[in-house]
Structure formats: structure tokens, C-alpha cells
Amino acid sequence: MMKTITFAFFSVFFAGLLATAQAQTHNADFIYGDPLPDAPELAARGKYGVGVQTLQLVNKNQIDVVGSKNGKDSLYDRLLTVEVWYPARIDADKQQLVAYDEVMGTSNDPKRPLIAFKFKGRSLRNAPADQSDGPYPLVIVSHGYVGSRFLMTYLTENLASKGYVVVAIDHAESTFRDAASFASTLLNRSLDDLFVLNEMARLGAKGNKGFWAGLLNADNTALIGYSMGGYGALNVVGAGYSRQAATFFGQMTGGSKALEKRTAGTAAYQASLDPRIKAVVAFAPWGMQRAIWDTAALKGITVPTFFVAGSQDDISGYDKGTKAIYNATTNANRFLLTYVNARHNVAPNPPPAEALAPGLPLDEYLRYAEPAWNERRINNINQHFVTAFLGIELKKLDYHQYLNLKENANETPWKGFKPRTSVGLELKHAQP
């Protein structure tokens, strides 16, 4: 009888826990990035209010990969829409809330039509800047293919609340709305990053009279990239592409040699390396398993780099993908955070409610979701580790205790994690 009562009690107890977890995951009031009860310490938002603005930047006379024909490159003015989050002064009577306009689907796939939706964020549109502790470090964020500047708002808002100016790029011809030839993504990711860095440096210069003047310090910049965003970010900081990658690009484009200026060892590539970039966070960077880099080229990365990957990544690969990049980046102080049994989606926001609608292609849900992990939990863990890493590298904060950890979280509880919650994770660390 006692066994029956005990079993019934625990059945009800665990059913209640499950219902609570489901409510937390799908509660319409939650906003991406809000902490779950088991969020690690540094996932909490910082002391600053967060403002947000949309900017349109034009990179003139760029190679038009989509419009070029027969191996002959044509030029165009490349329009980039960026979203900028920043420390802001927000009056007590103002609600720190914004609605982001997003779509799911893919513009160049008739089986996945675009579906518009909105989701909430914890920032205030066009709020006045908080200049009290500026200029703030600059963080540039690059999405995957396909994606958008809103793909990681849980992280962009969080970092702005901690005293960073965060710029997320809509990479033209690589977003949900305007997806085009993959060749454009191969060429333009690193070029877009560098252009946005230069533009934000210009806008943030103290002699400028605009909104951004004196608010940001572009000489103290980090790059964050997910998937193809990671591919581009690593190229920006020293991982020149292989000759095989340049050949592959030429075959895709009917003979264009445009990617050669981003290949390892060329004078143009070496001249592009920018000392203003002090750190990189690369989520599941694509390319290693496709011979985009060789091990010699990866030795060109010397800036501190924090890699994040799923051990079952079926897009970028793990052993022959992100882990292989980590192992070959021997001239950098580097970390590799692994979500055990996760696949590729270790960076984006959780699935929107619209992705749960019956009849949609499963890929609309799996573009965001992880089969073995709660995406909100991943978001909180990312907030924690990116805060620690960038805090050390850009703000010189003493967060080393959060990174000096035993490799396997299952064996020894990790600093900053609540009891019984540091499981399913691994953190490797190597120095030059």
C-alpha cells in the first residue's frame, strides 16, 4: 500500500514539475533571454537600461555575386540593415519593451513560404543613450544562413544591459526575407563584418556630432558569429580560406576569383587583419568539414576565441568541425564549450509560438529547437559564458573563476551554476 501511495505522490509531483517547465517554456509573457530558475549566475541582466535603434548602412561598389555573369564581376551598392542595442537612460515611467518584426520560412524555397510574426524584447526603441560609463566596447553579431539580425536577441539585449554597444547585421542575400545564392554568403560574411566595424567606428568617433559619438569604442571590439556567421568571423581574425575554398567558390560562380582576396597568405588578406578586434565567440562555425580551412591557416588566429558547439552537430560537424577548428587554433587562447548531445542550434532564440502551428514544415521548428535540450536553458548558459569571456577580454574584469573549470561538468559542479544544474556540458581550454 505504501508503495502505491508513494508512487502516486511522486507521479503527481513530477507531473506538476513538468507542467511548470512547460509553462515556463511556452508562457506567452516570457521574453527571450529571461532567466529560468536554474540560470547560471552571469546570465542575469546588467545594471543598464537597454535602447535599440535600426540603422541602414551602404557599402558602395561591392562585388555583386548574384548579378555577376560568366565569371565577370559586376558591382553594386550593398545595403545592410543593422540593429543596435546600447546602454540607455530609461525613465521610471517608461516600459522597457519592444516588438520585433520577424518572419519564418525562406524566400527562395517555395515549400517554406514566409510567415510574418512578432516577438517581444526587453529594450526601448530610440531611448536616450547612457553616456555615464562610455565609451563602451563594441560587439558585432553575425547570424547563420539563413537568419536575421533578430536571431539572438536573448544575447544582444543581455550584453547591452552589461555595458556593450551591440550591432547585429542583416547580411544581404542571406536572410529569411532575401535568401539568394550561397556564393554571396561565402564572399560577404567577413567583408560585412569589417565594413560594419568601420562604419560604427566612424559614427562613434568623438568628433562626430551624431547620436553615437563617444558612445562606443571600436578599438575594443568583439565578433560573435553563428554557423555562417562563425565562418565569417574566423576569417576576419586570421583564418584565411583555403585554395580549395577559392576554387569551390569559382565553380559556384562561373569563374569568379573574388574569394581569393580572403584566402590565406595573400597580401590583400593579410592587410585586412584588424587589430581593433580583441575577441571572438564562434557558435558552431561552418566550414571545417568542407575544407574551407586547413590547419596551417587556422594558426593565423591569435585573438582569444570562445567556441560553442553541440557534440552531435549535423550541420557544421563536431569532431571534424568545431572541435577540429579548436584543436588547430594553436596560436590563440581558446575555449570550447560543448553541449553534449546537442546538434547545431546552440545559438538562436527559442522557437517562436508560430513555429508550433500544425501543418508547418518541421524545419521551421528545428531551425530553432534542440531535440535534447531546452533552448531557453541554452540561452541562459550562453549569456553566462559570453559575459564571462567578454568581461575578461574587453572589460578586464576578474571573471576567470567562471572559466577555470574542470572539463566535465558532470564530475565537478561548475562555479556560477546552481546545485545539480551543471550537467551535460564540457569546457576545454588551451593556450598558445
Image (tube, grey):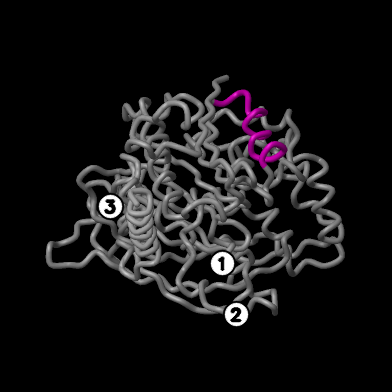
Which residue: 64% across, 45% down?
312
Residue 168 drawn in magenta: no
Of the image marks 3 and 2, the number of the one nearer the N terminus:
3
| Residue at mark 2 | 359
Residues at discs 3 and 2 in contact (Cβ within 8 Å):
no
What amino acid is at disc 3? Pro
Instruction: Report x, y in % for residue 82.
Output: 47, 62
Q: Nearer the viewer, mark 3 or mark 1?
A: 1
Neighbours of disc 2 within 10 Å: few (<14), some (14-19), many (20+) = few
Q: Nearer the viewer, mark 3 or mark 2?
A: 2
Instruction: Report x, y in % for residue 52.
Output: 34, 62
Residue 32 seen from this side: no
| Residue at mark 1 | 365
Of the image marks 1 and 2, the number of the one nearer the N terminus:
2
Q: Which residues are magenta?
A: 318-332
In the current view of this chain or complex, which residue is farthest to the front?
A: 1
Calculate the distance from the C-alpha at mark 3 to the C-alpha at mark 1.
32 Å
| Residue at mark 3 | 87
Neighbours of disc 3 within 10 Å: few (<14), some (14-19), many (20+) = many
Label 2: state its secondary structure.
loop
What amino acid is at disc 1? Tyr
Residue 53 seen from this side: yes
Q: Is residue 216 above or below residue 369?
A: above
Q: Considering depth in this image, is 56 or 327 the residue closer to the camera?
A: 327
Location of the C terminus by quadrant is: top right
Calculate the distance from the C-alpha at mark 1 to the C-alpha at mark 2.
11 Å
Residues at discs 3 and 1 in contact (Cβ within 8 Å):
no
What amino acid is at disc 2? Gly
Calculate the distance from the C-alpha at mark 3 to the C-alpha at mark 2.
41 Å
Q: Considering depth in this image, is 86 or 198 the residue closer to the camera?
A: 86
